Image (cartoon, helix red, strand yellow):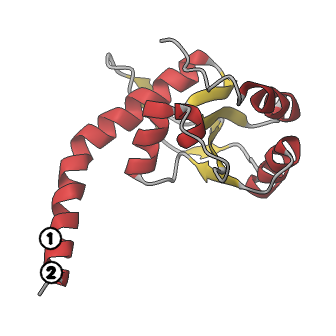
Amino acid sequence: MTYRRAGSGSEPALAAVRAAVAGRPGLGLLLLHGSRSRGEEHTGSDWDFGYLADVSVDGDTDVSVDSDTEVSVDKATDVSVDPAALYDTIASALGTDAVDLADLRTSSALLRFEAARDGVVVVGAEEEHRRFVLEAVHFWCDAGPVIRRAQAEVLAGLDR
């Protein structure tokens, strides 16, 4: 899998973020997504980032990986990543508070899919990125039609 590259105008800013968060304990993956990752930013665009914390596994935990690279972890917990501190580090590196930061483990299916589709890796191993993309796209392909159908029903109910 080849990493996406942000538009050349974003690279100096991403280098500053990369340097600022380098070696941060527990940070497994940091993605730039949204308009800046697609090269569609404008003067008022914010910076959209998503992160995944590393996962720690208790000693008596079952970890299984099936043939489709789906990882199942029982009793797994995120290693502590302080979202406020991570946000502050990123905003300081960029010199703006126009930053959105999302935990990609708890974000909506749509945000996860869009981050997987458009995301530019700022920090993280290729394997972690690949695993995230496969899981997010797989879930969206399963859940997306159900979500869209439910949304249509809600919207139709509003027209009554």
Q: Residue at x 71, y 30 (%)?
A: 10
Amino acid type of the residue that numbered disc 1 sits on in the rendered structure: Glu
Residue receiving disc 2:
157
Residue closest to the eye, 154 or 9: 9
Marks 1 and 2: in contact by CB < 8 Å? yes
Q: Is residue 127 above or below residue 99?
A: above
> Percent x, y for residue 75?
53, 45
Image position of 19 (left or right of 45): right
Q: Is residue 70 above or below residue 56?
A: above
In this view, which residue lies farthest toward the top? Answer: 1
Other-residue count near label 1 (Cα within 10 Å), few / some / many at <14 / 14–19 / ≥20: few
Image position of 38 (left or right of 88): left
Cα–Cα span, label 2 and label 1: 6 Å
Q: Is residue 113 above or below residue 106?
A: above
Q: Is residue 75 above or below residue 118?
A: below
Judged from the image, the secondary structure of the residue bearing numbered disc 1 is: helix
Image position of 154 (left or right of 67): left
Q: Residue at x 44, y 29 (%)?
A: 133
> Percent x, y for residue 130?
48, 21
Q: Residue at x 56, y 24 (%)?
A: 128
Would residue 3 be visible to someone looking at this image?
Answer: yes
Q: Name the disc covering residue 115, or none.
A: none
Q: Quadrant of the C terminus?
A: bottom left
Judged from the image, the secondary structure of the residue bearing numbered disc 2 is: helix
